[in-house]
Structure formats: C-alpha cells, structure tokens
Amino acid sequence: MTMKKGIVVVTMMILAAFFAGCAKISSPTGGPRDTTPPKVLKMTPENQSVRFHDKQIRIYFDEYVTLNNPTSNVLISPPLSETPQYTLKGKSLIIKFKDTLRANTTYNMVFSDCIRDYHENTPLSYLHYSFSTGDSLDDYMIQGNILDAKTLTPSKDFYVLLYKNTADSMPFTTRPDFITKSLDDGSFQFQNITEGSYKIFAIKDINSDLLYNLPNEEIAFIEETVTAYQALPDSAADTLKASLPKVTLFSFAAADTIQKLQRYENPASGIYVFPYKIAVNRFSATPADNALAFFERFNETRDTITWYLKSPMPDTTTYYFDADNHLDTVRLTPYHEKQATGRGRQNQTKKINVTFQNAGEYHKPLTLKFPYPIRPSDSFDVYVYSQQQSVKDTVIYRYSVPDSFVMQLPLPMPYMEKKSYTVMIPDSVFYGYNELTNDTLKTQFSAKSVKDYGTLIMNYELPEDGKPYIVTLWKGEHKIQENRLTGTSTITYPYLNPDTYRVSAFCDENDNGLWDTGDYSSKRQPEKVFVFPKNISIRAYWDLEETFKIGMNKAG
C-alpha cells in the first residue's frame, strides 16, 4: 500500500511539473501590442573599433530578432566582393566575413530596416556599425535627402552611391566606394568616410547590382561634386549639427522613348481603346479590308486613342496603324457580350447609362454625361418640378442635341437659390450610335447660392519674367484649374467648395505645357517643381488671399 501511494505522489509531482513548464512557455494573450524596436545591448568588437583583425562581428539584442533580406538591406562600404554569412544565435546576430579586408581602411555597415522584433515584427529602422583595419577611424561625413522630382515627396529605399572617381560613366559601369540607403523621410547619411570630394547618385536598384543599367530604374544626381566635411562630436549642440550642409537630390524615371502599342481593349459594344506606351503626336489608321466609320478621341496625355463606332461591326477587320512611324497591324473583332446566368440574366440592361453632373451648382449648368456618342436630335423635353409656397410647380424646358459627336450635354436652366428641384427626362430620348437608348432619367437636388462657395486670390511672384511657368490648383489628386504664366500675376479662383486645396507650379523649360522628366545620359534634370508651403483651407462665403513666391520654397 505504501509503495503504491508513493508512486501516485511521484506521478502527480511529475504531471504538476510538466503543466507548470507548459504554462511558463505559453504566449500571453491580450494587452497592448509591443511597438518597441529591438535594442542593441553589446557589440563585439565594439562599434568604431580600430586595428580590427577579426573574422566576425556579433551584435547582442535585448530580445529575439529576425533578419529580413540582408543581401539587400545590409549595406557595406567599401563594398565586399563576397557577401558575408549572417547567422542568428539566441538573441544575437553573427556576421562572418568571407573576404580579406583591406589594410588601413574604414568599413561601414548600415542595417536598413532589416532587424526586426521576432514576435511583433517591429523593425529597428537604422543601425550603423563602423570599424577600421588601421590605427584610426575616418571621421568625415556627407548627409542629405532625396525627393521625388514631380511630387516633392520623400524618396525612400533609394541606394545612395558615392564615387571617388568623378567620371560620368561611374553609375553605369562601377560599383560605388561608399553606399547607404534613404530612410522613410528621404534622408540619408554617410558616416566615417575619407576626406575629399565625390560624385553622388541615388538609384532605385531593381536588379540589386548597384548599377544604373535598367530603363525603368529611377535615378537622382547632381553634376557638381560634393565635399565631405568633418563630423561633429556627439556632444556638439543640436543647433550646430543642424547647420551642417545637406545635399538634396531629386529622383526621376527617364522618359521611355520606345513606342509600343499595348494590347487593345474592347470594353463595350462599339468601343475600342488603343493604349500606347508614350504620347502619340501623329497617328493614322488605314483599313486593310473593311473600312469602319468611327469617332476618334485622344486622352489628355495623348497616349490612348479611343474609337466609337458609328454602326455595329459585322465582322472581323484589319487596320494598319502608324503612330509617329511606329507601325502595327491590328485585327479588330466584334464585341462578344459575356453571358449572365440566373438572376444576373434578368437584370441585364440594353440602355445607355446616362449620369447627371453639376446638379444644383450655382455657376455651372446641369450636365448629362454619356458613355457613348449620341445622335443629333432636333428637340427633347426636360421636366423640372419644384416646390413653391406649398404649390408644386412644373416647368418643361426644350433642348436639342446639335452636333454629331456629343458625350456631354449641358442643360442651362434658372434656379431659385436653396429651393429643391426634381429633374426628369423621359425614356428613349437619346440614341447612341451603338443603337442603345436611355431609360427614364431622374435627379433631385437643392440649388446652391453664392454664399455656399469661397474664393481664393493667389498672387504668383515668379523668380524671373519671360520664362513660362505652369501653376495648378488641386483638391486632393483632382486638378481644379491650370494656368500658364510668364510674369508676376494674380489669379482669382471663384466658386470653390469649402475644402482643403493645394497649389503647385513648375518651370516649363521647353514651353510644351507638360512637366518633363530628366535624363542622366544628356545630364538633363527634371523640370523644377515648386509647392505652396501650406494647405489652403477654403470657407463658405469667404475670400482668402495668399502670395506664392515661386522659387523661394522649392524643397531643399
């Protein structure tokens, strides 16, 4: 009996120990997410060591970490011919060198957003480790930032390259002497580099070879060299550090100069869309067999052509396209509508989908927008219902479709401010060239008054008269108004809905009305962009006057 009791007691103790052990390693539930990045506790050899002759570096952290793509995200200057071996062991990272390091050389290692918290994936955004194989550490630096040339937003994750050789061919043919990477705010910094002047470039390195050798890789450059300056000690005042020079680079993708017709689209019966890679200046289409009657329309950037057929296409036909001497043979097939099943088949419609625009606006007429050109019409009736002193008033307005190519039709009519209206157009009034007609159209709105809008008065001061500038008022990504200026001017923007707006400008160097990107081969920078330094808040029934000194607030 005693022996059996003893066995039971021991068994219970083992089970208790087992479950206790399980409880210790289980993950806690609930509570706030840990957003603190890993913290470095120790480095061996120490950061900024001299007379370095080790084969490896070990970095200890306060928690378990992961390493994200070290081949691209650990930057070593001067670059090594062989990638080191990276190993995670416990709460540490071990870097083993395969190369023989150069004598009397300062090396820099930048860990860019690749060391992450094991549990929450919180990144350590930037870690810099340097050492010297000689008796002293180089203590010169270069810092700056990279901005997108068109939007002036930060260009992050660009490789920034420094070359002692100042030949123009360097980014095409040679790996850099020093390398770093831009952070989320576009800033970058070279530390512990040698004294002297350098050629500087930044590239969005798609194929990870540290060369500018793909047509779609973005680049940023300046023609003059940059001079490294001696770094200040950590104890220096922040104001003194802020006064150190910074270089600003503007990134861009070079314009594609090779024309190509993309796969054409046939989104609906009678509509054919032909997208090209770049803008088309001169275009012709010659039929090989059956000629089609169609309306032709270019988009605003002239890189897409749309055909609207004047009658259904009975059979396949072939055309020869010539876009600025780029020749294509295009085989057009009739539109085949997708067959719906079940309830979808019952809901299929053969009507033109007409929409209303500018309903109730004080300064714009109510406008109909059509997805397909409609045929001319001598007259049609529009019924307008309004509530006037408890009496429902009905007015019939008569309009016409005067032209052969109409996709927007204004319906000017008088409104009484703040009154509610219902506009109705009967079915089968409009007929598209695609043989479809409209269903009954109806919209309801309250007419606005002049007090519902604000006005912006913008004084534009140009850095030099005679040179053309394009100024644009934006609401979000929507372009409200664009103007060409050649001298100091004032533009009034009336009837703005209360909202937040912004203003930008660019120097139109070639006077073509478009923003043009740069080209490194010809040493041409992108056209300079300027932004008004603050958002513009428009209030109803309020005039706001501002002054935009163009050229005074270009980022950098």
Image: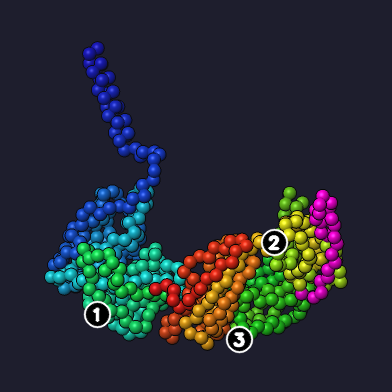
Residue that carries the numbered disc 2 in the rendered image: 449
Q: Which mark is residue 196?
A: 1
What distance separates the C-alpha of mark 1 from that of mark 2?
66 Å
Is residue 384 magenta-colored? yes
Q: Who's the residue at 25% across and 54% down the image?
A: 40
Is residue 6 magenta-colored? no
State yes or no: discs 3 and 2 in contact (Cβ < 8 Å).
no
Q: Quadrant of the N terminus?
A: top left
Q: Is residue 157 visible?
A: no
Q: Nearer the viewer, residue 439 or 315?
A: 439
Task: First in sequence, mark 1 or 2: give its number.
Answer: 1
Write the start and end of the magenta stretch as one range. Answer: 383-405
Q: Is residue 503 left or right of residue 121?
A: right
Q: Nearer the viewer, residue 412 or 517?
A: 412
Q: Is residue 88 visible?
A: yes
Give the foreground label among 1 and 2: 2
Q: Is residue 522 left or right of residue 48?
A: right
Secondary structure, mark 3, is: loop
Report x, y in % for residue 56.
Answer: 20, 61
Q: Which mark is residue 515?
A: none
Residue that carries the numbered disc 3 in the rendered image: 325
Q: Is residue 206 left or right of residue 368?
A: left
Report x, y in % for residue 525.
Answer: 44, 81
Give the foreground label among 3 and 2: 2
